[in-house]
Image: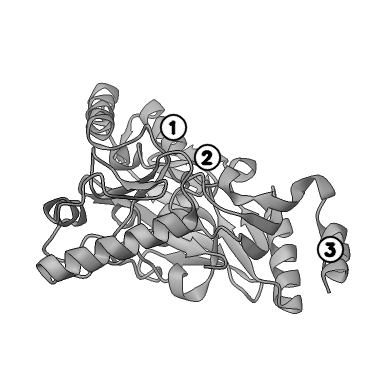
Amino acid sequence: MKENFEKKLFAIIDKEKVLLDEPMKKHTTFRIGGPADYFIVPSEVEEIKAVVSLCEETGMPYYVIGNGSNLLVADKGFRGLIIQIYKAMNQVKIERNVIIAQAGASLAQIAMEALGKELTGFEFAAGIPGTLGGAVRMNAGAYGGEIKDILRKATVLTKEGKVVELSKEELEFGYRTSIIERTGHIILEAEIELAPGKREDIKAVMDDLREKRVSKQPLEFPSAGSTFKRPEGHFAGKLIQDAGLKGFRIGGAQVSEKHSGFVINTGNATAADVMELMRQINEKVTARFGVSLEPEVRRIGEF
C-alpha cells in the first residue's frame, strides 16, 4: 500500500516538496516529536486539494500544521502525512483597511504589514508565535483580543475537495475553538478588518505587549505556548503555581519558573515526559482546588 501511495503522491506533487520520515521536532516550537511518514510543503491550493483527495481516497491519515507552535507530536511520530501550510503560502495583501492573507502568513508578519499601513486592531496578535491558519482554527487570543474580533471571513477546503467561504458567524468561534475543529476543514485564506490608526500609537502598543511577553513568558526555552486552557473563573498558571508546582519537572519537561502556565523543554524532553508532567499537574491541581485543567496544546501521533 505504501509503495502505491508514494507512486500516486509523486504523480501529483513535486518530489522536492515531499520529505520522507521527517523528524517532527524540526517543525514544532516544542522541538519534540518523532518522524512523520510523509511531510509535504505545498505552494498552491491545487496541490493541497490533490493531496487531500488522495489521502481521503486511500485512507491515509493526514494533519495540517503551520509553524507547529501549539503542537505536541508523539515520540513515535505520525503514521501518515503532514501538510505544512507556512512560508510557501504566506502572501499578504491590503485593500484599504482589509488585510487578505494566506493561511501560512505568520501573525508577526501580518502585524508588521498592518503597522506599515497604519491599521490598528491586530496589535494583540503580534507576539503570538503562529500562522493565520492556526490562529483562525483555534480563535487565538492574547491580552484581551481574539481573532474573532477582527475576522471577516475565511476561505477553506472541505474534505470533499470544495473551496468555500465561511463568514465569521459560520465559523462558530468559541474560547480557543471554531467549527474548523469539528469539520476538519483546511483554512486557505482569511480576511481581517482593521481600523485606521496612527503608526506611533500602534507601535507603542506592540512594543508594550512585546515587553510584557519577554518579561513574563519563558521565550528562551522551547514550548508550545500556554499548556492548558483558562478554566472558567480561574487562571491555569496561578492554579499551577498555587499548587506548588513552579519548577516541577519530569525528565526534560518542566513547569516554567518564569510562568507556571507554560511547560518548557529544558533541552532533551520527550513527548512522554510532557504528557506525564501534564497528567500530574492536572491531578495535583484537581486534588487541591477541585478544578480540572483542559490541555490547550494539540497532540498528534502514537501516544
**Which quadrant would residue 196 be assigned to in this image?**
top left
Instruction: Provide the residue designation for mark 2.
Output: 92
Instruction: Residue at 40%, 68% (x, y): give it.
Output: 171
Residue 202 drawn at (x, y percent): 27, 29
Q: Earlier in the sequence, mark 3 or mark 1?
A: 3
In the displayed structure, 198 sits above or below 244; it is above
Q: In the picture provided, is 265 more to the left or to the right than 58?
A: left
In the displayed structure, 216 sits above or below 47; it is above
Q: In the picture provided, is 291 more to the left or to the right than 119?
A: left
Residue 209 drawn at (x, y percent): 24, 33
The amino acid sitting under disc 2 is Val
In the displayed structure, 200 sits above or below 164; it is above
The amino acid sitting under disc 3 is Glu
- The front one of 256 and 155 is 256
> How many labels sit on residues?
3
Image quarter of the N terminus: bottom right
The amino acid sitting under disc 1 is Glu
Badge 1 element: helix
In the displayed structure, 50 sits above or below 246; it is below
The numbered disc on residue 286 is none
- The front one of 62 and 120 is 62
Instruction: Provide the residue designation for mark 3.
Output: 6
Contact between marks 2 and 1 (CB within 8 A): the answer is: yes
User: Alpha carbon of mark 2 to alpha carbon of mark 3: how far?
Assistant: 33 Å
Contact between marks 2 and 3 (CB within 8 A): the answer is: no
From this viewpoint, is residue 293 visible?
Answer: no
Badge 2 element: strand
Instruction: Residue at 41%, 65% (x, y): give it.
Output: 167
Q: In the picture provided, is 142 more to the left or to the right than 47?
A: left
